[in-house]
Image (cartoon, grey):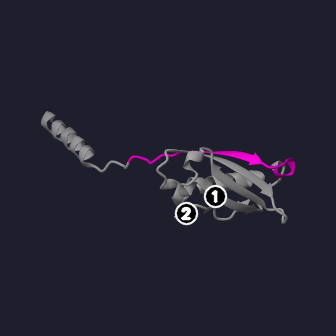
Amino acid sequence: MFRVCIILVSSVLWLVSCSKHPEEDAFKQIQLHWNPVDEATESSEQKDKCVIDITSKVMRDPVVLASKLVEISYEVFYQLDEKGALVFNGLCGDTRFSDLPECSWQTTCTDGSASVVKFHNER
C-alpha cells in the first residue's frame, strides 16, 4: 500500500511539473483621465456609456497591447459636435512618447456606443 501511494504521489508530481504553464500575462497599466471641454459635454446623457465603451476598446486594442510601454496614461478631451455626438481625443500624458502609435487616438460616440478607436500614429 505504501508503495502504491509513493508511486501515485510521484506520478502526480511528475505530471504537474511536465504540464504547460500559462504564459506570463503581459499586463499593462492603462489610465484614462477624462476632460470635458464644457459643462454641456460633462452632463451629456450618453457620456457614461461612451466612457465605458471607449475604455474597453482602448484596453483591448492591438496597438495598445503591442506597446512596449508597461504603463500608459491618457489625457482624454471630449466635446459635443454639431450633431450631438461626443468626440473623444486621447493623448499620452507623457509627451516623451507622443510619436508612438499608441499615444494619439480619436473616436466618436453616438447613443452610448463608440465607433472604432482610430490611432493617428499607426505605422
Relative image position of residue 43 (x, y in whole percent): 84, 49
Which of the 4 image quarters holds residue 87?
bottom right
Relative image position of residue 37 (x, y in whole percent): 80, 49
Q: Which residues are magenta?
A: 24-41
Asked whether, in this view, residue 48 is left or right of residue 12, the answer is right
Question: What amino acid type should be assigned to the residue bearing mark 2?
Answer: Glu
Question: What amino acid type should be assigned to the residue bearing mark 1?
Answer: Trp
* CB-based contact (under 8 Å), mark 1 and mark 2: no
Query: Which residue is nearer to you in this view: 103 or 114?
Result: 103
Element under disc 1: strand
At horizontal 24% and vertical 48% (from top left) the residue drawn is 18
N-term-proximal mark, 1 vs 2: 1
Residue 75 against residue 119 in the figure, above or below: above
At horizontal 59% and vertical 44% (from top left) the residue drawn is 94
- Picture quarter with the N terminus: top left
Asked whether, in this view, residue 69 is left or right of residue 21, the answer is right
Q: From this viewpoint, which residue is outermost toward the left?
A: 3
Residue 105's label in the rendered image is 1
Indicate yes or no whether the magenta region holds residue 6. Answer: no
Q: From this viewpoint, which residue is outermost toward the right?
A: 40
Q: How far separated are the C-alphas under marks 1 and 2?
A: 10 Å
Asked whether, in this view, residue 2 is left or right of residue 78, the answer is left
Asked whether, in this view, residue 110 is left or right of residue 63, the answer is right
Q: Which residue is mark 2?
A: 122
- Crowding at mark 1 (Cα within 10 Å: few <14, some 14-19, many 20+): many
Query: Which residue is nearer to you in this view: 12 or 69?
Result: 69
Residue 2's label in the rendered image is none
At horizontal 57% and vertical 52% (from top left) the residue drawn is 59
Element under disc 2: loop
Residue 2 against residue 32 in the figure, above or below: above
Q: Report the number of discs.
A: 2
